[in-house]
Image (cartoon, rainbow, N blue to C red):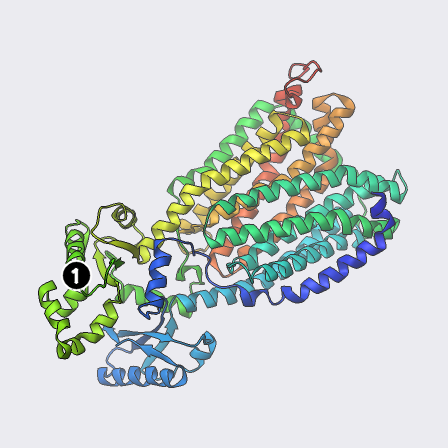
Amino acid sequence: MRSLYRFRKGIVIIWIILTLFMGYFAFQLPGILSGSGFEMEGSYARTQKVLEEEFNQDPRPLILLFEKEKGASKSKFEEFIYETVNHLLEEYDGEAAPPQYKNDYAYVSLSLKDDTNIDKIKSHLPKHEEFAVFLTGSKVIEEEMSQGSQTDLKNAEMIGLPIALIVLLIAFGGLVAAGIPIVIGIIAVLSTMGIVYLLGHYINLSIFVLNVVPMIGLALSIDFALLYINRFREELTKHPVKQAIANTTKTAGRSIAFSGICVALGLSGMLFIEVDIFRSVAIGGIAVVIVSVLSALTFLPAFLSLIGHKINKAMIIKGTQNQQAKWKKFASFVMKRPILMTLASLILLTIALLPIKDMELEIPDATALPADSETRIAYEIFEDNFLPSDESNVIFVLQTKDNLLTKKSLLKVEDFISKLEEEGLVNKVDSIFSAAGVHTEEFLAIIQNTQMKTQVQPLLDSFTTNNKTLLYVTIDAPATSEKAKDWVRDIEGEDMPLSFTVGGFSKFNQEIFDEIYEKVPLGLLLIIGSTYLILLVAFRSVLIPLKAILMNMFSLGAAFGIVVWIFQEGHLGNAPTAIGLMIPVIAFAVVFGLSMDYEVFLISRIQEEYLRTKDNNLATLQGLTITSKIITAAAAIMIVVTGAFAFTEIVPVKQIGIAVALSILIDATIVRMILVPSLMKLLGDWNWWVPFKREKVRKPGK
């Protein structure tokens, strides 16, 4: 503490230089973020790699969707398609598949070799009175999501930061004290985004990092500063600046350190899941937590040491004791009826929990974009007209030990196809044999004849390499169905004549879902177990950490129930849509830590009072009364900063923002105002029980 005070000017200067340096890189972060983040090692990824590198297939082609007005000339429509595609191929090096037609629509798969700007391609699309052309596909969807995320971040900051400043102004009453947490928030977020930019050159980072890092960073760092400044001002009324800083760091600083550890542990649980989106969000989140804690425990005390009593300058709202009196009265009311209040709270939370049982999870696709997005509308038209809803395509890459074009190898391929066709779910198998319209013996005769082999060479190039061949299998189940996921999982365990990998959207879905369901329990065990141990050490209590974790789980569950009601059931002006697969995992990791922030601060203050008075009921009442205003402000800031993302356009970001804001709102009202005082009263001195403690424990209520 002495070093912090002694070198306060140097510490402030170092942080300013660091922020400016990292801020330069922070503004470049969007340029290195790519993809939805749903990438992982597995059979699907290996199949995609073979298709791209050995068969020269574009795994994610652009889709040109054409639409004609009813009654318009079909021949002119075909001519418009031909001219549009040729014009694009003249502008960009690439290939196009033949057009596919249905009703008044057509589409062309377009593979461009250059990494061309999507907006630039759109600018080359022609306009016509009777026909229209739209660009869509996974690349276009991801590009629009990336651009939307950047816009959403700006909009959320424009909403969240001014309201956060108002909350701080109400909490502190002065412009100086209210402005410092905002500065701390900006320092933490800019520094972290610069660090994440540098990390992005070595690891794949999802575009969702752009929203999650500022969401966590602003909420956490502003709250840390709020709690620290509040305690500093309190200490400043009794001690000189140097001693006030020392006392604040020992109390509020300790709470910040412990809550930072809890938040980091909550996020670290995602590292178990070997899917890029979870790992990148975990890395970005942990980075912003570390920077927030460091800035709160170094820059903030150094800066406050410099300004000292000027922290109380520019006061425009006078504090009143009436607020504390009202909180004391309310807490007393609750503690006089602990059983009734506990039951009422649990009933409310259970009602909110109920919709969870019907929650449907899906990997975000075009539906993540706004309902009026041209890219989304075009893709949905493409899906409705050209992708059968009751079946899906599975790609097999078969690998032989010897050259594929030998009788022994081809017989094994034919045997493999026969076994697939015996599968009840298989509708059709397209292979080199079905494409040529022959069986093994005839096929061998064709490829052994030089002239005939030249005629089938395009087929050989499409279906075979030296020792690999492709099978396109159609199964009677939608790609997202459990039936399709079970089939692609089970087929890998069957005894087949050749080694193989499996691809297709159903395999992509199956691997992602399996990875999450298998690894989430490990993450939960780490988060809950380590958080319990940290809080056990912090509060020297067996029951308080257990209560904190259980109440956290209840508030999270209730929040998710409401999220399902809002989005999946389509209330409050939202079109019905499934919940993004990553939302529960990310929101749990974020909220579990964030809500522990002021939970730690509250219980720390109650513990202080208990150690001083040895009276549990008085300590609870005093702790709640003293911290009520500042913790309410802390929770309000978290709700404002995270809830601002509810006004964004990208649906998964909106879902995360609402889930986090709701969880904190429930935690700050029902849990903190009712459940905490009720349970503290019911358990009495048992709240502070630990094994092998010498003090005799008094019975509850005595």
- Residue 390 horizontal/vertical position (percent): 23, 56
* Residue 336 shows in this picture: no
**Count of numbered tags:** 1
| Residue furthest right in the image | 240
The quarter of the displayed image where residue 411 is located:
bottom left
Is residue 462 left or right of 306 when viewed as pictured?
left
Q: Nearer the viewer, residue 593 or 161?
A: 593
Q: What is the quadrant of the N terminus in the image?
A: top right
Is residue 425 left or right of 33 when viewed as pictured?
left
Label 1 residue SS: helix
- Residue, x 81% and y 47% (percent of image)? 318
Q: Nearer the viewer, residue 645 or 487?
A: 487
- Residue 607 horizontal/vertical position (percent): 72, 28
- Residue 571 horizontal/vertical position (percent): 44, 51
Q: Nearer the viewer, residue 97 or 316?
A: 97
Vertical position of residue 469 compared to residue 290: above or below: below
Is residue 128 left or right of 649 when viewed as pictured?
left
The quarter of the displayed image where residue 443 is located:
bottom left
- Mark 1 sits on what residue? 410
Q: What is the quadrant of the C terminus in the image?
A: top right
- Residue 500 horizontal/vertical position (percent): 27, 55
* Residue 75 shows in this picture: yes
Amino acid tagged 1 = Leu
Q: Nearer the viewer, residue 304 or 13?
A: 13
Vertical position of residue 412 compared to residue 329: above or below: below
- Residue, x 14% and y 50% (percent of image)? 422
Query: Dot 1: few (<14), some (14–19), or many (≥20) neighbours within 10 Å?
Result: many
